[in-house]
Image (tube, rainbow, N blue to C red):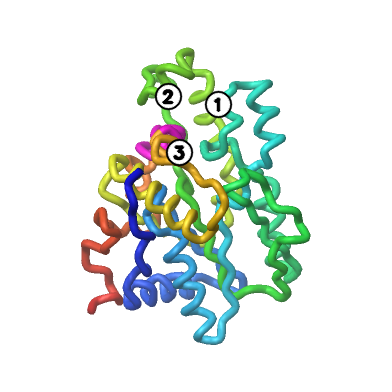
């Protein structure tokens, strides 16, 4: 198995500051700024950096990831039995608890919230007793995830399989049609966003390498626990390919701000307010 170094330290300070300024331009008190991009783009890292900078300026900042809204394993296994076996695997639209997300935003605005938490290694939602408690209304909520505001595809676009997973395990298209329809269910979450930043990577072809780097970092942070092998990652990203390509095709005209990044997660265009 190839040995890779964990993902680097993050985005440049000037870019982080520019993102924070965009977020703070939203009306308060509980501003919600979305950060989206394909797997491995650096959304979680950027969100943490922006939150840290906000707190350094005396503001209360919270990071919420759509990954922490995954349905727990038993619920996904039920979907796998009742709808399609591929739905037992987390990731694709329809594998999240939208109601939990809405309730979390309501609780944040009320100043009495616990942030859901999901353990990707055990593939289980953590018990509520382990969720972070947030007292008081935050000045800023950074809501990050990989398919914010991605619209469903048309029926004709779903006919042909896009990869080996769809060809071999979803020959009749039932899984991909179900996930495509589920995209509409996320509208209440997207409505929470005051603005959306899209980190536009070079293409889906980069995602397997980026996702593998994430797994290396996860393994380094959790010695003694089993994480996914490279071949398992190669299969796992196939669950995301269709919606990821739809994101690349649609989000540049949907997001409020699109910033292109290269394969090393370097910002490759001039960003107003972040010039070095």
For residue 86, the mark is: 1
Magenta span of residues? 235-246
- For label 2, the crowd category at 10 Å Cα-Cα, with few meaning under 14, some 14 to 19 and many 20 or more, is some
User: Is 239 in the magenta?
Assistant: yes
In the displayed structure image, the side of residue 172 where residue 182 appears, left or right: right
- For label 3, the crowd category at 10 Å Cα-Cα, with few meaning under 14, some 14 to 19 and many 20 or more, is some
Task: Work out whether residue 243 can be spotted.
Answer: no
At x 60%, y 78%, the residue is 60
User: Mark 3 and mark 1: span between their CA atoms?
Assistant: 21 Å
- Residue 184: percent from left, percent from top: 55, 37
User: Mark 1 and mark 2: span between their CA atoms?
Assistant: 9 Å
- Residue 59: percent from left, percent from top: 56, 81
Ranked by sequence position, the earlier of labels 3 and 1 is: 1
* Main SS of residues in magenta: helix
Element type at marker 1?
A: helix
At x 75%, y 53%, the residue is 127
Element type at marker 2?
A: helix
- Is mark 3 in CB contact (under 8 Å) with mark 1? no
User: Mark 2 and mark 3: span between their CA atoms?
Assistant: 22 Å
At x 37%, y 69%, the residue is 9
Residue underneath mark 2? 165
- Is mark 1 in CB contact (under 8 Å) with mark 2? yes
Element type at marker 3?
A: loop
Ranked by sequence position, the earlier of labels 2 and 3 is: 3
- For the C terminus, which image quadrant? bottom left
- For label 1, the crowd category at 10 Å Cα-Cα, with few meaning under 14, some 14 to 19 and many 20 or more, is many
- Residue 229: percent from left, percent from top: 44, 41
* Rendered view: 117 above or below 53: above
Residue underneath mark 3? 151
Ranked by sequence position, the earlier of labels 1 and 2 is: 1
Foreground tag (3 vs 1): 1
């Amino acid at each position: 198995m190839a040995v890779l170094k964990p993902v680097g330290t993050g985005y440049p300070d000037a870019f982080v500051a520019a993102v924070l300024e965009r977020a703070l331009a939203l009306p308060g008190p509980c501003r919600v700024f979305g950060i989206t991009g394909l797997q491995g783009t650096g959304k979680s890292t950027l969100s943490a950096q922006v939150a840290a900078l906000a707190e350094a300026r005396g503001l209360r900042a919270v990071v919420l990831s759509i990954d922490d809204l995954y349905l727990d394993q038993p619920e996904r296994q039920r979907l796998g039995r009742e709808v399609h076996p591929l739905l037992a695997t987390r990731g694709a639209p329809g594998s999240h608890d939208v109601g939990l997300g809405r309730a979390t935003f309501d609780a944040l605005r009320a100043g009495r919230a616990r942030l859901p938490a999901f353990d990707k290694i055990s593939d289980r939602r953590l018990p509520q007793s382990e969720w972070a408690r947030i007292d008081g209304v935050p000045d800023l909520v950074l809501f990050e995830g990989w398919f914010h505001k991605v619209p469903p595809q048309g029926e004709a676009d779903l006919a042909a399989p896009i990869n080996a997973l769809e060809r071999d395990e979803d020959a009749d298209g039932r899984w991909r049609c179900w996930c495509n329809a589920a995209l509409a269910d996320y509208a209440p979450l997207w409505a929470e966003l005051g603005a959306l930043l899209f980190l536009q990577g070079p293409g889906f072809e980069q995602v397997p390498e980026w996702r593998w780097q994430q797994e290396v970092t996860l393994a380094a942070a959790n010695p003694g626990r089993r994480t996914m092998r490279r071949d398992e990652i190669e299969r796992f990203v196939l669950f995301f390919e269709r919606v990821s390509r739809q994101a690349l095709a649609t989000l540049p005209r949907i997001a409020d701000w699109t910033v292109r990044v290269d394969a090393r997660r370097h910002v490759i265009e001039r960003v107003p307010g972040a010039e070095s």
